[in-house]
Image (spheres, rainbow, N blue to C red):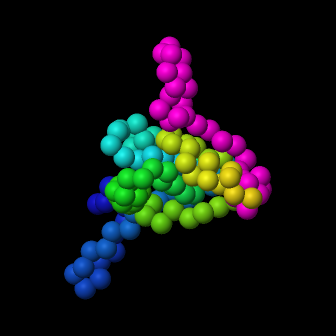
């Protein structure tokens, strides 16, 4: 007897397991822009986005890395692979969710073709940052 959501087929003594995954038609599509590196806030945010994608609440179309650390891209790939999404495709007009440096967006805005791309493809920009109680600037907004 197989656990719920699994089926097995026996062929010449070999057992194959097929996981029945729900087909998602998420209404909200998103790109995640991150400075994935030495802290934990970005990995938590990416994990939450994958959890939302598992519940069909969003479709995670891409993850952008916006910091100079070389290992960030490999770490993002590891997290995406862990959650079963090693090849996240690109998409259409959608929000960008940024929890790190705004380097990628800065470069796009300084480039004429980049500005046109943002105007036609970005529906909304959501960023993590702000200054609520200290007289210094937020690190992500420097």
Relative to residue 17, is residue 96 depicted above or below? above
Q: How many marks?
A: 0
The range drawn in magenta is 113-142
Instruction: Say which residue appears at 38% left-offset and 53% top-offset.
Output: 69
Asked which quadrant contains residue 125, the reply is top right
Q: Is residue 63 above or below residue 10?
A: above
Q: Which residue is rendered at x = 49% and y = 21% of the image?
A: 136
Q: Based on the picture, tell me whether residue 130 belongs to the magenta stretch.
A: yes
Residue 26 in view in this figure: no
Q: Is residue 60 left or right of residue 39?
A: right
Magenta span contains residue 58: no
Choose between 47 and 98: the one closer to the eye: 98
Q: Which is more toward the observer, 134 or 5?
A: 134
Which of 28/17 is in front? 28
Q: Position of 65 compared to 104: left or right? A: left
Q: Is residue 122 left or right of residue 4?
A: right
Whole-percent x and y of residue 23?
Answer: 56, 59
Q: Position of residue 76 (x, y in %)?
A: 40, 55
Q: Residue furthest top?
A: 133
Q: Quadrant of residue 129?
A: top right
> Residue 79 placed where, x, y %?
37, 54
In-image side of 23 versus 124 (left or right): left
Which residue appears at 31% of the width and 73% of the height? 16
Quarter of the image holding residue 126?
top right
Q: Which quadrant is the N terminus positioned in?
A: bottom left
Outermost residue, bottom side? 12
- Residue 87 visible here: yes
Residue at 62% x, 48% y: name it: 106
């Amino acid at each position: 007897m197989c656990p719920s959501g699994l089926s097995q087929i026996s062929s010449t003594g070999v057992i194959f397991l097929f996981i029945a995954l729900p087909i998602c038609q998420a209404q909200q599509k998103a790109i995640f822009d991150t400075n994935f590196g030495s802290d934990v806030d970005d990995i938590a945010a990416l994990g939450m986005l994958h959890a939302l994608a598992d519940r069909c609440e969003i479709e995670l179309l891409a993850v952008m890395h916006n910091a100079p650390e070389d290992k960030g891209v490999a770490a993002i790939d590891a997290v995406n692979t862990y959650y079963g999404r090693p090849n996240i495709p690109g998409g259409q007009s959608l929000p960008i969710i940024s929890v790190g440096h705004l380097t990628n967006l800065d470069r796009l805005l300084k480039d004429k073709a980049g500005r046109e791309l943002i105007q036609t493809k970005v529906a909304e920009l959501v960023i993590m940052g702000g200054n609520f109680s200290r007289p210094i600037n937020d690190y992500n907004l420097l």
